[in-house]
Image (spheres, grey):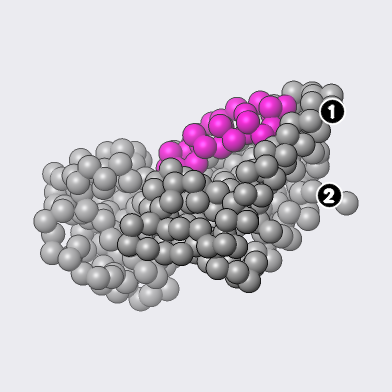
Amino acid sequence: MDIRRLRYFQKVATLGSINKAAAALNMSQPALSRHMQHLEAHLNAELLERQNSGVMLTSAGRILYNHAGPLLDRLDSICREVRSASPVREVEINFGVPPAVGRLIMGRLIREASRMHPEIRLKVSEATSDNLVEWVLNRQIDFAIVLEPRTSPELLRVPVWSERLFLVGLPDDPIFARAALRIRDLSDLPLCLTGRKVGARRCIEESFRAAGSTLRVTHETESISSVSAMIEATGAYSIMSFAAVRSILDSGALAGLPISDLEVTRHLIWRRDIAATPATGSFRSLVQDLVAAECGRLDWLSLAPAAERRDAQDVLSGP
């Protein structure tokens, strides 16, 4: 049984509402509903009776709920006991992320690392993907999440998630009334893009070439934060990851729509000769668990193929 889903079930049962539980867990209602369906399928039992006012436990659900609390408390106690019995040696892990990724996961990653792995002292740096790759190669940092890193015999990498890119522009533009967008719909639109030093730009150019569409770049900037000002001043558009412009879209200052056939993949990278220690293995697992939770919460993120993630796990964990 997936312990995470058991915790989700406990929250739903306690609050009597999938909507309230989703808000408390910081995930979308459809994602939480899917987790409950998977749990019911695993147990081959209906656990929740859906009603207009919320949910009620079935008889099977009541049995599971009565056992879930003590079971989860016991599991947490065992984890604390095992950790306290082992001599703790603080390990520093230097981790690099692009600013957009930092806004997406770093708060939760730092909290979870402190709670679950107090022996790990996390030091975080932010830079473009290209700079992060250089820092890993030069041993300035241990791990980084980057966009489509170049192949190097000194690096190992594992794809952790893919994310759709968004067309962003002024909120009253009729293009955002469409149900969906594809690359071909964007041909010849005036675009404000980051320079080629930013990894997403190269991915965008390659995708437009593959689709046979014209990429018309009218303005460039090396600063993601200045893109919104350029859009407002010129009436042009931009193509960005949702994480990069999430707060602006939430404020209503700009509008955005996902481009269904334009995705980028982010990879976790590290040097091939990095020591495979319990701390590095725990950190990698923590990153992937956190990413899995975000992918369940946010529709515009999707996990990398399981086989690819598993292969890299075997490499990093060692024999």
- Which amino acid type is shown beneath numbered disc 1? Ser
Q: Nearer the viewer, residue 233 or 107?
A: 107
Dot 1, crowdedness within 10 Å: few (<14), some or many (≥20)?
few
Residue denoted by label 2? 318
In the rendered structure, the answer to whether residue 316 lies left or right of residue 109 reads: right
Residue 142 pos. (x, y %): 67, 36
User: Residue at position x 14%, y 49% from top?
Assistant: 234
**Dot 2 surroundings within 10 Å: few (below 14), some, or many (20 or more)?**
few
- Nearer to me, 127 or 310: 310
Can you tell which mark lies on residue 86? 1
Q: Is residue 134 left or right of residue 246?
A: right
First in sequence: mark 1 vs mark 2: 1
CA separation in Å, label 1 and label 2: 21 Å
Q: Nearer the viewer, mark 1 or mark 2?
A: 1
Prevailing secondary structure of the magenta residues: helix
What kind of residue is marked 2? Gly
Magenta highlight on residue 120:
yes
Residue 161 drawn at (x, y percent): 54, 56
Q: Is residue 37 above or below residue 155?
A: below
- Residue 308 rendering spot, x and y as whole percentages: 67, 63
Q: Which residues are magenta?
A: 100-127
Under circle 1, the secondary element is loop
Give the residue drawn at x 38%, y 75%: 211
Q: Of 116 and 102, which appears nearest the observer?
A: 116
Residue drawn 22% across the image and 42% down it? 251
Whether residue 101 appears in this view of the structure is no
